Amino acid sequence: MDANNQITADQLNEKEKMIIDQVLKGFESKRQGKSSSYVSALFAMEHEFNGEVLSIKMPVTPIVYNSLGIMHGGITATAIDTAMGTLANKTALPGKAAVTNQLNLHYTAPIIDGEITAYAKVLHAGTKTMVIEGWIETADGKRAAHATGSFFMIDKK
Amino acid sequence: MDANNQITADQLNEKEKMIIDQVLKGFESKRQGKSSSYVSALFAMEHEFNGEVLSIKMPVTPIVYNSLGIMHGGITATAIDTAMGTLANKTALPGKAAVTNQLNLHYTAPIIDGEITAYAKVLHAGTKTMVIEGWIETADGKRAAHATGSFFMIDKK
Amino acid sequence: MDANNQITADQLNEKEKMIIDQVLKGFESKRQGKSSSYVSALFAMEHEFNGEVLSIKMPVTPIVYNSLGIMHGGITATAIDTAMGTLANKTALPGKAAVTNQLNLHYTAPIIDGEITAYAKVLHAGTKTMVIEGWIETADGKRAAHATGSFFMIDKK
Amino acid sequence: MDANNQITADQLNEKEKMIIDQVLKGFESKRQGKSSSYVSALFAMEHEFNGEVLSIKMPVTPIVYNSLGIMHGGITATAIDTAMGTLANKTALPGKAAVTNQLNLHYTAPIIDGEITAYAKVLHAGTKTMVIEGWIETADGKRAAHATGSFFMIDKK
């Protein structure tokens, strides 16, 4: 850390250390190609695909809290959109990539701690668009959010 | 950084340095009470409220990119949900807090660089729920996303 | 038909006769208690409930077409909302009724003729809200629309 | 009315007469080209366009009630989707028509009687898609519903 930063490494408090630790592990994961983006890396997402359902596991730490101390609705959306988008790209025709066109989320229970799993499953696969459903389960198997999204299939650069 | 991390501070590449720099500035902002959560801090969000419209400015750096090199749809959702939620909490009756119940987003243009502004405005304010619209404009004034959300008003702890 | 109407029964063309016939059958169904509303009656909806999934069958006739000659997106919404709302009311606690709070629909294929079936299934049943998914299949088993909705549980009058 | 119908014209009760009257007026409106579909005709919709906002007026009669005696959520969707779709088609490039791809609605107040007005306004006009917002006001100016929809632009037959 250079002298221009207001905070230096030895001045970090416990929560900040935990977050920096998570970010550095994310860099490692990104360098090794396990994460395809810093977003996935930052939130320590790990995905798995069984051929039908794509799932992403993610720890619930202070980095994801909103000002009320529960998981931020936008981070919930990020976990679900990542699961859906990864699935859309994995199942796209050769030469095609998927971009989110529309996303709709229902929040059904607060997420407080432990580990969540975001799931994604294709509802409709057209040549130009895909509709995918996604949902989040808490460690004890409760549905904390349910979503649907539509994706545009574009030519990969 | 302690010896347990795979990556140490002097091994960071340019993008990683930029991200760590942004995270440390976020900690500073969180400590000073300018950010109410690490999420806001991480993405360097700064909000402003003119009494009707709440706006949040946020830089577009590699930390927000998806695997296609454009802003991740979930981070777009995070910026909008933060603007909406901050507005809902600011305009809530005394003793009440707002939690996201439902969020719907349309993505209308890719976000690549510069600075974005997320806006939020109340459409309906009931005693139990609020409906809020939100949208994102790029630096050149283009609408990149449009959203509506409903919020439940709960008793503040 | 009284003299004040511009059109009298003997002046109806074929499509108009088909519609009037459908409306009169709907009145019959409403009188017999088979339809709980004129909306269900007008569109000749018939529902069935297997304990988990509620389904509604409905014929596709000119009465439901939009100006492009395919089923009107609002009528698709009506079929799905009716299935969801009927399910919500059937599974509500004693003394409670369900009203639609939010509805989100993806249209995945045009509906042209034959008979459609709208399905509804509970995703989340809370004491104050329910989240339900719904979808429409055409006669040949194709998914023409997919929806999710949230319902508020209110005291029955 | 022919002998095959269970109900004949002289057996109609007051509500049924009101509905048949509305349907016949709708036929008249459809014949004169004032309504572009039987759906618009049935619900006696009248539209107006000021160059920016398209509005549709519609009476609230028993024909639109759900089983709770308030306007059916699907019919609310129909009024809004008609306003949005009419606007999309009016502002489409020559040779193009618009079909609903996705529709999201928030219901903010029950609609009981009087006349409602549904409004539609373009949020984003692309070459392939449009995003439009729509809302419903009751006779006393209260917002009863708010919606956004995305439309695909297809080649007109």
Image (cartoon, coloured by chain):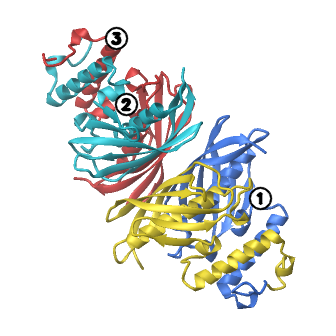
Chain colours: A blue, B yellow, C red, D cyan
Where residue C17 sits: x, y (%)? 30, 14
**Which residue corresponds to mark 1?**
A36
Q: Give the alpha-carbon distance from disc 3 to disc 2, as whole Å.
A: 22 Å
Local packing at callout 3 (Cα closer than 10 Å; few below 14, some 14-19, many 20+) is: few
Whether residue D72 is visible here, answered yes or no, is no
Name the mark nearer the viewer: 1 or 2.
Answer: 1
Q: What residue is shown at x 62% (from left), y 72% (from top)?
A: B44
**Which residue corresponds to mark 2?**
C45
The amino acid pointed to by label 3 is Glu
SS under mark 3: helix
Nearest the camera: A35 or B49? B49
Residue A4 horizontal side relative to residue D18, left or right = right
Where residue A70 sits: x, y (%)? 53, 72
Q: What residue is shown at x 70% (from left), y 60% (from top)?
A: B65
For residue C14, which numbered disc appears in the image?
3
Where residue D20 sits: x, y (%)? 22, 24
Task: Spot the residue most to the bottom.
Answer: A11
Q: Give the alpha-carbon distance from disc 1 to disc 3, as whole Å.
A: 60 Å
